[in-house]
Image: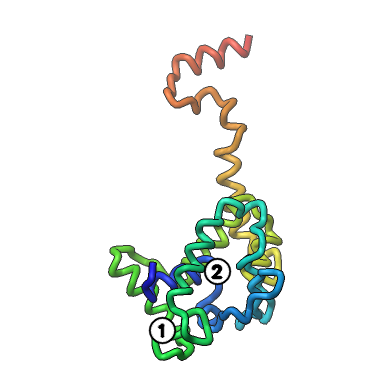
Amino acid sequence: MNTVQRACFELVYWTAARTIDAVKLSPSHVGKDGILTFIQSKTKGPAYIPWNAPLPEFAASWQAERETVHLAVENLKGGFTFLATSNGKVRSHKGLSNVIADAAKEAGLQDCTAHGLRKSRLTDIAEAGGTAHAIMAWGGHKTLQEVEQYTRAAEMKRLISGAGTERNIVSKADHDTKIANSLYFSMGD
């Protein structure tokens, strides 16, 4: 928990910040309302992340995860930013990307990147039932079109795994096609 790699991973994943922004994040970005707010370098739009504020309903089960990121960055105390180097200097965004990629590689994970952590958080929001506007706020997107990839994929999963599938006799765990066929044909009578 108290490694640089873990702190970098946790902060990028929790905030869904791009590395160019994540390296600049600090306690000064957390308002009195408990919302971590920053202006993104790429879009010039704001991103809003619940740092100490109550979690939105879709993220209510993420409290332990939020506590983990707080503990991880607390262990790097001493610099102006959450992810300061051991000398207290602001970490470079390329350096942050390398820390995450190298740690993933060392753990035996392939193709894991800082940008993948961002996409994963935004996907989590969509799959947890967060609205497109929630994804926009957390990810700092400017348009609904930008978040459509997350909501579309989450909706497709919901369509095939929701309560409607419970009525589908063929999807029962035993997959007994004789029973399913007999019920299907008897319903047609």
Q: Identify the residue at horizontal 37%, vertical 73% (top origin).
A: 3
Looking at the figure, which quarter contains the C terminus?
top right
Residue 83 drawn above or below residue 106 = below
Residue 64 drawn above or below residue 180 = below
The quadrant where residue 85 appears: bottom left
Q: Nearer the viewer, residue 99 or 167?
A: 99
How packed mark 1 is, by other alpha carbons closer than 10 Å (few <14, some 14-19, many 20 or more), is: few
Q: Nearer the viewer, residue 87 or 59?
A: 87
The quadrant where residue 72 appears: bottom left
Question: Could you tell me the amino acid type at mark 1?
Answer: Gly
Q: Identify the residue at horizontal 62%, vertical 68% (top origin).
A: 139
Q: Position of residue 135 (x, y in %)?
A: 64, 62
Residue of label 1: 95
Q: Identify the residue at horizontal 39%, vertical 86% (top origin).
A: 86
Residue of label 2: 16
Q: Position of residue 140 (x, y in %)?
A: 65, 71
- Element type where label 2 sits in the image: loop
Question: Could you tell me the amino acid type at mark 2?
Answer: Ala
The answer to whether one can see residue 152 in this image is no
Q: Identify the residue at horizontal 43%, vertical 80% (top origin).
A: 96
Task: Please report whichever mark, 1 or 2, sits nearer to the chain's N-terminal start.
Answer: 2
Q: Position of residue 8 (x, y in %)?
A: 44, 74
How packed mark 2 is, by other alpha carbons closer than 10 Å (few <14, some 14-19, many 20 or more), is: many
Relative placement, left or right, of 4 versus 35 is left
Relative placement, left or right, of 15 versus 30 is left
Looking at the figure, which quarter contains the N terminus?
bottom left
Q: Position of residue 74 (x, y in %)?
A: 48, 74
The quadrant where residue 106 appears: bottom left
In three-dimensional space, the C-alpha distance between marks 1 and 2, rounded to whole angstroms, equals: 17 Å
